[in-house]
Amino acid sequence: MASLKRSIRIAVAVLTVAVVVACAAVRPHVAAGPPPRLLFTGHIEGYLEPCGCSEGQLGGVARRAELLRRLRAEPGETLLVDAGNRFIAGGDSGAIQAAYLAKAAARAAVAAINLGVDERILGADFLYDIEAVRRLPWVRSNAPPSREGAWPGEPLRRLVVGGQRIVIAGVSTVATRNEGAVPDPVAALRSVAAERAPEERLVVLVQGSVADADAIARAVPAIDVIVTADGGHAPGPEAHTVGPVLVVATGTDGKWLGAITLTPGPLVPAAVTTYALGEEIPDDPATAALVADYYGALKEARVLAEEPPQPTVGGSFTGATACQSCHPDAYQIWQTTGHARALTTLVERGKDGAPECVACHTLGHGFTGGFVDAQTTPERGGVQCESCHGVGSNHIANPSPDYGHTGEHTCRPCHTPEQSTHFDFETYWGRIFH
């Protein structure tokens, strides 16, 4: 009898082990510890760093790198994605900019970058010719055919983060002038959704508006998350759901970084945190050095002289010294202002070879007789009289009180909300009144 009881106990134990093993074999793997986070950015548009001309500016690859370091030091794995529109400029200066932005992306370990309309405007050859750009993890689920051959990248990427299997697709809703239309993003995403495994999460990067993203969510409810590069000057409408789909927006110029905690089940807006890349975040030293190298490369390549100048209208430039004889008091006041030292500030920061900077820090860059570079035309450095009042040769030949009326409209091309965050016309005019 004792032998029978012992046999029964052994059989029960074996059966219990078998059941546990069987359950473990069919149960999906769930990683121990904190859930992973999906980090997102987008619509960077050539923006390596704030110009530094005003306080309170957001963004920059060096700040982003430092914030990424901090977030990745927290418990839980992370996966960084970019919703698209990373590059914007062509020519030699655009190639240098794209190469350094690509190096920054590789340093930041971006796992997927959507092929946006800005990249497609630049063309497949442009992207392929720059090795650092070509090697980026592009996704292009509905990219129109290129006249220059295939686009770099692949239709989608499959990755694992924190034990979760992720499928990343990338679509655009916007066509370039040469494309006419883009293949239907909904059809492309329905195909992706139909082929994914049940345990895979579908993350879709959209280059388009928030309204476009919402429409996609309604049409393809199998999507888990949509990250849209909407280009707004803030991260767009707050994170929201459309049916079971979580929709988030990146804002413009890479000024924000978002994080989504990938908890089990449908994702909700409460899982989203958005970080502004403000001045309280210091630059990552290695990435800051990369940005400094970028400005050095621009200067060495002398990209400021690559485009032929446009003709001036209403005469030609004369320079501020030509105004001095008739307007000595105004000239003297001008010499004491930041306008007169505008080029010097660029030289001191090593930015005097950057096209994105010199237009607002010099006289007539890009026009005949205007600033070329600090070596060739130093006399055209600074924001001079004609920067605000217009070319002066005709006025010198025929003085008239009708010449050179100024107002807030003449300041705004350079004192934009982006570059001059605290600009107030009356206050700033008081600093240069003459």
Image (cartoon, helix red, strand yellow):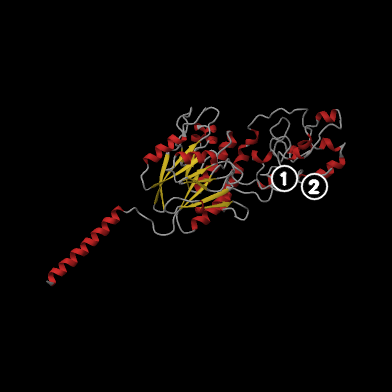
| Label disc, if present, on residue 119 of the rendered structure | none
Residue depicted at 26% across the width and 58% down the height: 21
CB under 8 Å between discs 2 and 1? no
Mark 2, residues whose alpha carbon is within 10 Å: few (<14), some, or many (≥20)? few
Q: Identify the image quadrant of the N terminus.
A: bottom left
Residue that carries the numbered disc 2 in the rendered image: 431
Residue 344: numbered disc: 1
Q: CA distance from mark 2 to mark 1?
A: 19 Å
Three-letter code, disc 1: Thr
Q: Residue at x 64, y 40 (%)?
A: 356
Residue at figure coordinates x 27%, y 59% from the top left: 20
Q: In the picture, which quadrant includes the C terminus?
A: top right
SS at badge 1: helix
Specify the farthest residue to the front. Answer: 243
Q: Amino acid at mark 2?
A: Arg
Say if residue 233 shows up in the picture: yes
What kind of element bears circle 2? helix
Q: Is residue 410 left or right of residue 30?
A: right
Quarter occupied by residue 193: top left
Q: Position of residue 127 (x, y in %)?
A: 50, 35
Q: Quadrant of residue 66?
A: bottom right
